[in-house]
Amino acid sequence: MRRPWIMPVLFVLCGSAVAAGMAARGNLAAGGAFLPVFLLAALLNSPLAFPRSISAAQAQRRGAVDGRPVVFWRPGCVYCLRLRLRLGRDARRLHWVDIWRDPEAAAAVRAVNDGNETVPTVFVAGRPHTNPPVEWVRARLSPSA
């Protein structure tokens, strides 16, 4: 699928154009400073910033077995990125499903969000929670929860 990569590619192209323009005007330092900022934005808005996505069916099976939450997300979503970054290493303990790669996942999200693809939508024990607080998600990962 190409759709998740549109925004990162645009960040790289725009960053390259800005850096080249600044360098052409003789301002190499500013151009060299802008390009890494755009590259970081491209990385953070790409699927690479998230743990590997699995299918909705596979995530639901795994979540039923190990009790871990299932997070439905999409690249470019600021709220998904915020959840991912604030969870830190704990994010690896969740099951991540990219709704742009899995039509079944997108349908599941629409079914619980009044027809909207509102993400992140976190399923815990089969119950959906739209854009929950990070602390709440982290508490669902603890062994006592």
Image (spheres, grey):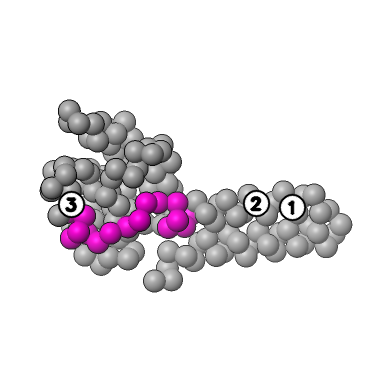
Give the CA distance from mark 2 to mark 1.
7 Å
- Name the residue at 43% across, 71% down: 2
Mark 1 and mark 2 in contact (Cβ < 8 Å)? yes
| Residue that carries the numbered disc 1 in the rendered image | 32
The answer to whether residue 35 is magenta is no
- The label on residue 36 is 2
Dot 1, how many residues are within 10 Å of its Cα: few (below 14), some (14-19), or many (20+)? some
| Residue that carries the numbered disc 3 in the rendered image | 62
Horizontal arrangement in the rendering, residue 77 relative to residue 141 (left or right): right
Labels 1 and 3: the sequence-earlier one: 1
Amino acid marked by disc 2? Pro
Give the CA distance from mark 1 to mark 3.
45 Å
Q: Which residues are magenta?
A: 45-60
Nearer the observer, disc 1 or disc 3? 3
Dot 2, how many residues are within 10 Å of its Cα: few (below 14), some (14-19), or many (20+)? some
Nearer the observer, disc 3 or disc 2? 3
- Name the residue at 58% across, 59% down: 11
Amino acid marked by disc 1? Gly
Give the CA distance from mark 3 to mark 2.
38 Å
Q: Is residue 21 above or below residue 132?
A: below
Amino acid marked by disc 3? Arg
Q: Position of residue 111 (x, y in %)?
A: 18, 57
Picture quarter with the N terminus: bottom left
Dot 3, how many residues are within 10 Å of its Cα: few (below 14), some (14-19), or many (20+)? some
Q: Secondary structure at mark 2?
A: helix
Q: Position of residue 52 (x, y in %)?
A: 35, 56
- Name the residue at 23% across, 48% down: 70
Labels 3 and 2: the sequence-earlier one: 2
- The label on residue 11 is none
